[in-house]
Amino acid sequence: MGLQIERIPTFGDNYTYLVICDETSEAAVIDAPEEAPVVARVEATGATVTKILSTHHHPDHSLANPALAKRYGVPVYGHRSDAERLPGFSDGLDEGDSVKVGNQQARVLFIPSHTMGHVAYVFDEAKALFSGDMLFAGGCGRLFEGDAQMMYDALCVKLAALPDDMRVFCGHEYTESNLRFAAHVEPENTAVAEKLARVEAIRAGAAADWHDASEAEMTIPSTLAEEKATNPFMRCPDAAELGRRRTLKDNF
């Protein structure tokens, strides 16, 4: 028994997640910009939503929080510093805190830089990391609010310390474009070339309407082992190089 993870396509290329405790059917919604796709998946699974978890305040991860909180009568969790910015915010979290979903437990990692109130949720027993827009498959989020040193500390120190078999559930289906950039930065990296070929084959059948995407077209989850081998931002020797690569990617 463990954690059932439902990947729900939302907006143009977002991933919302419904995580369900197999033993209790209690569930949490993670990063929801749209209400209808979440409600449909909750009804299809028969889960009982007990909380809403947000990785950060950006609307494409949180716009549906108030509607979902009202529908299910549940609290909305986010970093404590986002009390005034996160839609529906009710409960603040910080580094070292934990949240329960039925009999499953996630610990909170504070990983600012994409936004200053960004967190990740780590379900150690289920080997599942929900990394929002900080760590993508093959990439990372833009430096909107923090600096390169903060991002280096988040990606190359804090997240890199998690087990290699930790699955990475990120906020967007950006894998193909991220790996094209990775191949540009590290043209001799055979792991990147091999994964890019696999991802291109997966995405070749992708629906024009993301809401109609099938599981066969999804490149998520990745694993931390894969990211350490193929993600050019997790492979940086220092913050200066990460900042240089992030600027390159912004203009790629």
Image (spheres, rainbow, N blue to C red):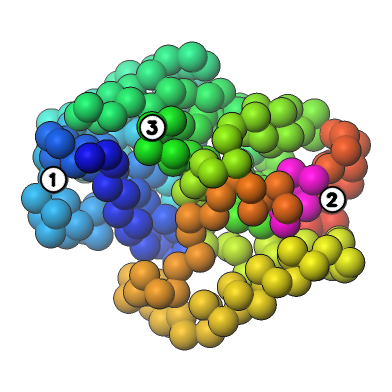
The label nearer to you, 1 versus 3, is 3
- Image mark for residue 245: 2
Which quarter of the image is occupied by the N terminus? Answer: top left
Give coordinates of residue 52: x percent, y percent: 29, 34
Q: Is residue 228 left or right of residue 62?
A: right
Q: What is the magenta range? A: 230-235
Count of number-bearing discs: 3
Q: Would you name the residue on which mark 1 appears? A: 47
Q: Quadrant of residue 50?
A: top left
Residue 37, placed above or below residue 122: below
User: Would you say the residues marked 1 and 3 are in contact, meaning their CB atoms lie under 8 Å apart?
Assistant: no
Residue 204, placed above or below residue 190: below
Q: Is residue 102 visible?
A: yes
Q: Quadrant of residue 53?
A: top left
Crowding near the residue tagged with mark 2, few <14, some 14–19, many ≥20 C-alpha atoms within 10 Å: some
Secondary structure category for the residue under label 3: loop
The label nearer to you, 1 versus 2, is 1
Query: Distance between the Cα atoms at labels 2 and 3?
Result: 33 Å
The disc labelled 1 sits on which kind of residue? Ala
Task: Return the residue found at the far bottom.
Answer: 205
Give coordinates of residue 40: x percent, y percent: 16, 59
The label nearer to you, 2 versus 3, is 3
Measuring 48% from the left and 59% from the top, which residue is drawn there? 220
Q: Is residue 39 left or right of residue 63?
A: left
